[in-house]
Amino acid sequence: MADTKKPVKTVRLYPVEAAIWKNATEKGAFYSVTFSRQYKDENGYHSSDSFSGTDLLLLAKVADLAHTAAEELRAADRQEEKATS
């Protein structure tokens, strides 16, 4: 079975979602974010990385929430580093 990486946090305001990913490097961890939009058709639920004009304000709000979440994760990493050093 393949080892699939999962996001460390997900922010959702349906149908827009932000997945926050932790990436470890020699210089420490950093976070990246991917965005997707969920939709349903006659074949079931799907995900897309394309957004319509009507999705853009919701995308901006999800991006803002993802930024806040990533900053909180960075702060927690810094606290953990201080506690272990």
Image (cartoon, grey):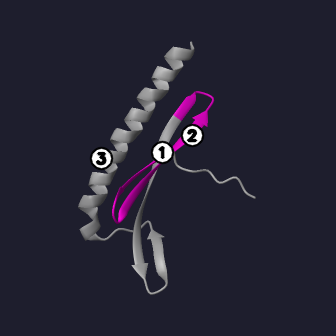
Within 10 Å of disc 3 (Cα), the crowding (few <14, some 14-19, many 20+) is few
Above or below, 38 against 79 in this view is: below
| Disc 3 secondary structure class | helix
Q: Quadrant of the N terminus?
A: bottom right
Residue in the image at 37% along x and 46% along y: 66
Q: CA distance from mark 3 to mark 2?
A: 20 Å
Q: CA distance from mark 3 to mark 1?
A: 13 Å
How many numbered circles are shown? 3
Residue 9 screen position, x and y as percent: 46, 46
Of mark 2 and mark 1, the one earlier in the sequence is 2
Residue at mark 1: 32
Residue 33 screen position, x and y as percent: 45, 49
| Disc 1 secondary structure class | strand
Residue at mark 2: 23
Please report contact status of discs 2 and 1: CB closer than 8 Å, yes or no.
yes
Please report contact status of discs 3 and 2: CB closer than 8 Å, yes or no.
no
Above or below, 84 against 41 in this view is: above
Amino acid type assigned to the residue bearing label 3 in the image: Asp
Amino acid type assigned to the residue bearing label 2 in the image: Asn
Per the rendered image, the range of residues in magenta is 9-29
Residue positioned most to the bottom: 42
Residue at mark 3: 64
Q: Quadrant of the C terminus?
A: top right
Residue positioned most to the top: 85
Amino acid type assigned to the residue bearing label 1 in the image: Ser
